[in-house]
Image: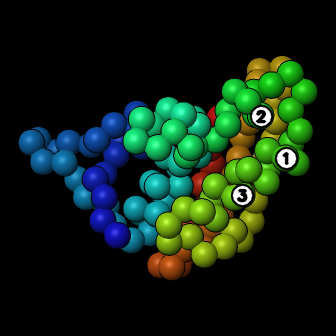
């Protein structure tokens, strides 16, 4: 699969002069995973059912970390070209309302390097 390259910090299209970059293979899977985990359910106008239920189930008063982990793992496994999750850990900072996720997934191209996402 081939996709446009995105800037890793701003998640906007990365331009090199007038050309946008291209990613494929394991880099494209890694980029797709990060974008899917940062997408809020209802945010994308073409399909309001994709994304994480951030305000409904994650950033709530008494979040259930095991239920959140199930949602996130399902999102990872539903990502195209992801075969399995090799390792997964999450930490919930209740005071600052931040969820940190770290995982390694196996794609059809091989194992991804560890991916860390803060929600």
What is the x, y in percent for residue 96? 77, 21
What is the x, y in percent for residue 86? 71, 71
Is label 1 in a helix, a strand or a loop?
helix
What is the x, y in percent for residue 5? 31, 51
- Circle 2 packing at 10 Å, graded few (<14), some (14-19), many (20+), is some
Q: Is residue 106 above or below residue 73?
A: below
- Image quadrant where residue 12 sits: top left
Q: Earlier in the sequence, mark 3 or mark 1?
A: 1
Residue wearing tag 2: 57
107 lies left or right of 31: right
Residue wearing tag 1: 67
Nearer to the camera, 58 or 18? 58
Is label 3 in a helix, a strand or a loop?
helix
Q: Disc 3 and disc 2: Cα gap in Å?
A: 15 Å
Q: Is residue 41 above or below residue 67?
A: above
Is label 2 in a helix, a strand or a loop?
helix
Give the quadrant of the C terminus: top right
Q: Residue at x 19, y 48 (%)?
A: 20
Nearer to the camera, 83 or 5? 83
- Circle 1 packing at 10 Å, graded few (<14), some (14-19), many (20+), is few
Residue wearing tag 3: 73
Question: Are circles 2 and 1 on residues that touch, CB within 8 Å?
Answer: yes
- Circle 3 packing at 10 Å, graded few (<14), some (14-19), many (20+), is some
Residue 110: image tag: none
Q: Earlier in the sequence, mark 2 or mark 1?
A: 2
Q: Is residue 43 above or below residue 29?
A: above
Q: Disc 2 and disc 1: Cα gap in Å?
A: 9 Å
Q: Residue at x 35, y 42 (%)?
A: 7
Q: Residue at x 30, y 65 (%)?
A: 2
Q: Earlier in the sequence, mark 3 or mark 2?
A: 2
């Amino acid at each position: 699969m081939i996709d446009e390259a995105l800037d890793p910090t701003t998640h906007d299209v990365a331009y090199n002069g007038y050309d946008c970059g291209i990613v494929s293979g394991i880099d494209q899977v890694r980029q797709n995973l990060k974008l899917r985990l940062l997408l809020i359910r209802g945010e994308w106008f073409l399909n309001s059912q994709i994304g994480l239920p951030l305000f409904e189930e994650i950033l709530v008063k008494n979040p259930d970390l095991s239920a959140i982990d199930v949602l996130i793992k399902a999102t990872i496994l539903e990502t195209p070209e992801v075969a399995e999750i090799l390792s997964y850990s999450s930490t919930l900072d209740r005071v600052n309302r931040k969820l940190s996720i770290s995982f390694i997934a196996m794609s059809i191209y091989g194992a991804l390097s560890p991916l860390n996402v803060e929600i």
